[in-house]
Image: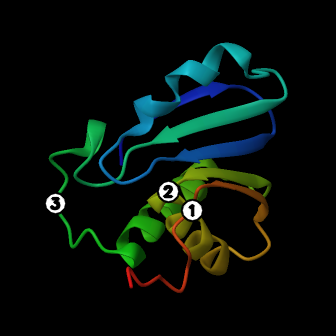
Amino acid sequence: MEYDVIGKGESLVIFLHGWIAHAAQYDFVVENLDLDAFKYIFLDYRGYGKNIEKKGSYDLVELATDCCEVIKKEKCDNVILIAHSMGGLVAQKVATMQQGKIKKIMLVAPVPYDGFSFD
């Protein structure tokens, strides 16, 4: 997976975007981040942004597994997830798959893990 990394801290913060978006939706926050205290990853899902050509099933398990692979690659046991919209659903799934490594989750207008009805 392609992703941007900034910062050099021991803790890893992964930003997860929403549906019909990409990691650049978080560009406006970069100037306010503490680059000494944290390492930040801005991940595009398969079919989005830097990974637009990456093929797959594009389902929740695959998106979460891709995020878990990034965590494994970065060799970090202190992970914070920040997610918007559909990214909230992905973050919740990652938390179930990476128990013990995910220390905090910030969800902004998340899709509920159990779904919802339009009725």
SS label for mark 2: loop
Tell us which disc is closer to us: 3 or 1.
1
Q: Residues within 10 Å of mark 3 (few under 14, many from 20)?
A: few
Compared to residue 94, the image places residue 53 above or below, namely: above
User: Which SS class for mark 1?
Assistant: loop
* Kind of residue at disc 1: Pro
**Which of the labelled discs sits on residue 110, or is there none?**
1
Alpha-carbon distance for marks 3 and 2?
A: 22 Å
Closer to the observer: label 3 or label 2? 2
Which of the two labelled residues, at mark 1 and mark 2, occupies the earlier sequence position?
2
Q: Residue at x 38, y 79 (%)?
A: 118
39 left or right, relative to 11: left
* Side (left or right) of 58 relative to 36: left
Q: Are marks 3 and 1 in contact (CB under 8 Å)?
A: no
Rendered image: mark on residue 55: 3
Whole-percent x, y for residue 106 in the image: 72, 54
Cβ atoms at labels 1 and 2 below 8 Å apart: yes
Q: Residue at x 52, y 69 (%)?
A: 89
